[in-house]
C-alpha cells in the first residue's frame, strides 16, 4: 500500500506535528488520502502522524458526518470526564481505558483554510481528543493507568515476538 499506517515503536508517533501554513492542493490531497486510508482500515479517526506526515491535520468519521480538521485547538472542555475503552489503528489489537472530557469545543480550519468551530460530545469528543493527542505525539498508552499500560506493553511485546 502507498501509505502504510505507522505502528507503535515508530518514532513519528511520539513526535509533535507542526502547524499547517499552506492551504494548497497538496493539503487537500493529504486530507483525501487520510480519509480513504481511515475508511480502508475501518477507523473512526486518523492523524497525519499515523501515515508518517508531521502536519497538524486529522480526519474523523462519526455517524453520517466526516471531519477533516487542520491546526485543531481544544478551546474548551467539560469538567465532567468519562472513562471508556479505546483502540488505535497504530496499536492494533490493544484496547485500554482512557479518561476523556465528555465534551470539547474544537476550533481550527478545514483543508481549504475556512475556520471551523465544533462543539463535540460523547464519542465524537473522544475521537477528537484522541486524534489531537496524536498530533502532540501522545498515545492511548500514555493516557491509561499504570497497570493497564504494563499489561498492554506485555501483550504488544508478545505479538511482536510471535510475528517474527
Ligand atoms: Co490512534
Image (spheres, grey):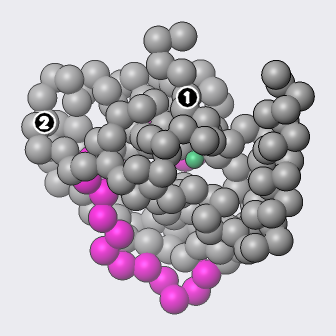
In the rendered image, the vertical position of residue 101 relative to residue 68, given as above or below = below
Select label 2 or label 1 by which is in front. Answer: 1
The secondary structure that most of the magenta stretch takes on is strand
Q: Could you say where residue 32 lies in the image, as x and y percent from the top left?
A: 36, 25
- Give the magenta part as a residue range: 62-81
Residue at (75%, 73%) from the top-left corner? 146
Quadrant of residue 35 in the image?
Answer: top left
Q: Could you say where residue 12 lies in the image, as x and y percent from the top left?
A: 45, 41
User: Could you tell me how far apart the alpha carbons at marks 2 and 1 are, in whole angstroms?
Assistant: 24 Å
Residue pointed to by mark 1: 5
The verdict on residue 76 being magenta is yes
Q: Nearer the viewer, residue 129 or 120?
A: 129
Residue at (19%, 44%) from the top-left corner? 20
Image-based side of 100 in relation to 111, left or right: right
Q: Nearer the viewer, residue 110 or 29?
A: 29
Q: Nearer the viewer, residue 124 or 10?
A: 10
Amino acid at each position: 500500500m502507498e501509505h502504510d499506517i505507522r505502528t507503535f515503536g515508530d518514532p513519528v508517533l511520539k513526535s509533535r506535528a507542526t502547524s499547517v501554513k499552506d492551504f494548497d492542493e497538496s493539503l487537500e490531497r493529504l486530507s483525501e488520502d487520510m480519509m480513504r486510508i481511515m475508511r480502508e482500515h475501518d477507523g473512526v479517526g486518523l492523524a497525519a502522524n499515523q501515515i508518517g506526515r508531521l502536519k497538524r491535520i486529522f480526519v474523523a468519521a462519526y455517524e453520517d458526518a466526516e471531519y477533516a480538521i487542520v491546526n485543531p485547538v481544544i478551546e474548551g472542555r467539560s469538567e465532567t470526564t468519562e472513562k471508556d475503552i479505546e483502540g488505535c489503528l497504530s496499536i492494533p489489537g490493544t484496547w485500554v481505558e482512557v479518561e476523556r472530557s465528555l465534551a470539547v469545543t474544537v476550533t481550527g480550519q478545514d483543508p481549504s483554510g475556512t475556520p471551523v468551530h465544533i462543539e463535540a460530545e460523547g464519542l465524537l469528543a473522544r475521537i477528537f481528543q484522541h486524534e489531537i493527542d496524536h498530533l502532540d505525539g501522545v498515545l492511548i498508552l500514555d493516557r491509561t493507568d499504570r497497570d493497564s499500560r504494563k499489561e498492554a506493553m506485555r501483550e504488544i511485546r508478545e505479538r511482536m515476538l510471535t510475528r517474527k
